[in-house]
Amino acid sequence: MSSLVTFNQILPQARNDLRSVGAFNAANLETVLSIFRAAVRENSPVIIQVYQRLFNDERASLIAAMTERLAAEADIPIALHLDHGESLDQIRKAIALGYTSVMFDGSKYPLEKNIALTAEAATIAHDAGVTIEGEIGHVPFGDGLPELSSASEAVEFIEKTGVDVLAVSVGTAHGFYKCEPVLDIKRLREISQCVSQPLVLHGGTGVSVDQLRAAIGCGVAKINIATELQSFFLCGVAAEIKKNGEAFKPVDLYFKPVEEKLTDYIATKIRSFS
Ligand code: 13P
């Protein structure tokens, strides 16, 4: 029997062991269940993360309740994380809902403002016994331009904010790529030589296992996957609907085979990160 864990209970060890914990974005019951079952099958720690938009209604709190219930009966460490938190209020809300880790994403601001806001968020999180992720540089969404992170910024950011884990920008972007990006492994190695905290790679969708393994070798202990997972789920449901034609089928029966395939997909990812 266990309960939810913070990042500090799983990620420093992962960095030491040169492995990465998969951080998968969940948005509904079926995606939570698939992530959970895949991690149990692989006997692996896992991070269930929830995009900040889902905090605008009951979804984030319902996902928290589901995840807490599943974690209570599992023997694997599970962290529940707010992904891309954009305000201090959202950080407070996630903590109140039982999230064990939060991200404050100040990467759209100049470094100084990012540091000031993230430091405030870190105090709120640490006072509540929750871990915090910050981001330097900027991992863009879609076709936006990346702003790569540097080792000197990483050192300054960690010293001044006290974040537990650091998301860095080394060539990835959120969403599907037109062609696979080439990660700046040299830059990542320089950063990892200067900071001992676990590093985070956003934009894991569409990056080859070889490149991800090279990143893990340079201190990346958390890899985020959202687009690929959600697209896998949606395409699976669309295929089931097409297969079934016009006849009525209850929603849970539509989702069941998709959940099973999604669980296999997530288990393969978890295995490749460790
Ligand atoms: P992708 O959607 O590209 O997989 O990125 C996920 C992510 O970084 C979530 O924060």
Image (tube, rainbow, N blue to C red):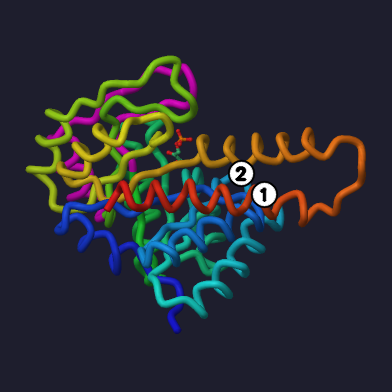
Q: Tell me the magenta residue range.
A: 135-162
Look at the numbered disc 1 and give the secondary structure of its residue.
helix
| Picture quarter with ligand 1 | top left
Left or right: 271 with respect to 238? Answer: left
Quadrant of the drawing holding the N terminus: bottom left
Look at the image and say whether residue 154 sits in the magenta stretch. Answer: yes
Dot 2 crowding, Cα within 10 Å, few <14, some 14–19, many 20+? some
Left or right: 211 with respect to 34? Answer: left
Left or right: 103 with respect to 209? Answer: right
Counting from the top left corner in percent of width and height, residue 82 is at 49, 53
Q: Nearer the viewer, residue 98 or 212?
A: 212
Q: Residue at left 45%, top 77%? A: 3
Placement of 5 over or under 29, stated as above or below? below
Q: Nearer the viewer, residue 148 or 174?
A: 174
The residue indicated by pointer 1 is 56
Q: Nearer the viewer, residue 139 or 255?
A: 255
Placement of 27 over or under 151, stated as above or below? below
Counting from the top left corner in percent of width and height, residue 34 is at 56, 56
Dot 1 crowding, Cα within 10 Å, few <14, some 14–19, many 20+? few
Contact? badges 1 and 2 (CB < 8 Å): yes
The residue indicated by pointer 2 is 53
Look at the image and say whether residue 16 sits in the magenta stretch. Answer: no
Q: Residue at left 19%, top 40%? A: 154
Residue 171 occupies quadrant: top left
